[in-house]
Image (spheres, grey):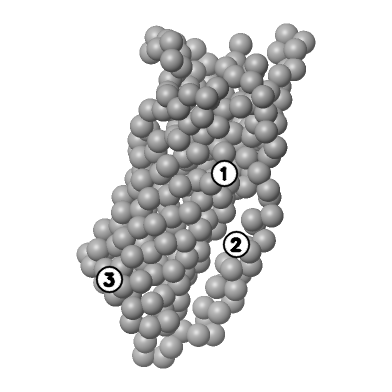
Amino acid sequence: MHLFHELLSRPRDSRGAMVPALGALLFACSLTPALAQEGGRTIYQSSGFELAFSYPLLDYKGSTDGGVIRFAPVVQAQHVFNFDLGEHLGAFAGVSVNNVGFIYQDPDGVTTYKFRSYDLGLPLGIKLGTMNAGLLFGGYSVEWPINYREKTFQYGDKVERFNAWFGERVVNPQQAVMLGLQTRHGICLKVKYYLTNFHDQDFTETEAGTTYAPYAGFNAHVLHVALGFALFQDHHTAYGL
């Protein structure tokens, strides 16, 4: 028996967000060889890794209780095309692999649910500050779920676990906004908020001849806080190449 099957569902989020993000990434890739300056780097690539904490902003049957902080020890990766328009202004577009999820504890204190999705993302945004060093950044990301995992615990013991590849349990695509800073030493702190509800409330499954929507009415928007390194630093600057 799954949680939430008696609740009402709501429509799936729009899938149209993939078009502008994909277009921005393709545009970035096409301009990279054409605009890189001789003797300077107007456009350059950088890569970064992150460790993240997440927390769900919940609305379950009118209750906001049950959220638990989740730490994802799995490293998340991002590769970025940087477009520095000047010494203190730049833009970026890239590709990322994200570990997104949250923990929900039933008010009875007996049952705990852990939800996780690996997403392929396309982030894009702007940078303000000293390019290649200390700066502020903000932007938008559209992400497509690749693998979903769900675990159920009762009294601390795991009673159920399953994975689904390219399934329909998570809203596809996910959309998020982000804001962060990078120090001159390359340490990054990023806050990311998912505008899209995590689960697809229209998803249905059948058990013992009964079809129901296990996530109907379960609203959870993930707040994601990540610590990373050298996300917007030129590889030559960050690693001495």
- Residue 190: give x, y in percent of width and height: 36, 53
Residue 65 in the figure: left or right of residue 131 = right
Residue 168 figure quarter: top right
Residue name at image x 44 percent, y 34 percent: 56
Q: Is residue 186 above or below residue 212?
A: below
Name the residue beneath numbered marker 1: 196
Label at residue 21: 2
- Mark 1 or mark 3, whichever is nearer to me: 1
Which amino acid type is shown beneath numbered disc 2?
Ala
Label 3 neighbour load within 10 Å: few <14, some 14-19, many 20+: some
Relative to 219, residue 15 above or below: below
Residue 182 in view of the camera? yes
Label 3 sits on residue: 133
Mark 2 against mark 1, which lies toward the viewer?
1
**SS for tag 2?**
helix
- Quadrant where the N terminus lies? top right
Q: Quadrant of the C terminus?
A: bottom left
Label 3 sits on what residue type? Ala
Amino acid type assigned to the residue bearing label 1 in the image: Thr
Name the one closer to the observer, 69 or 46. 69
Question: Residue sitting at 52 percent across and 81 percent down?
Answer: 33
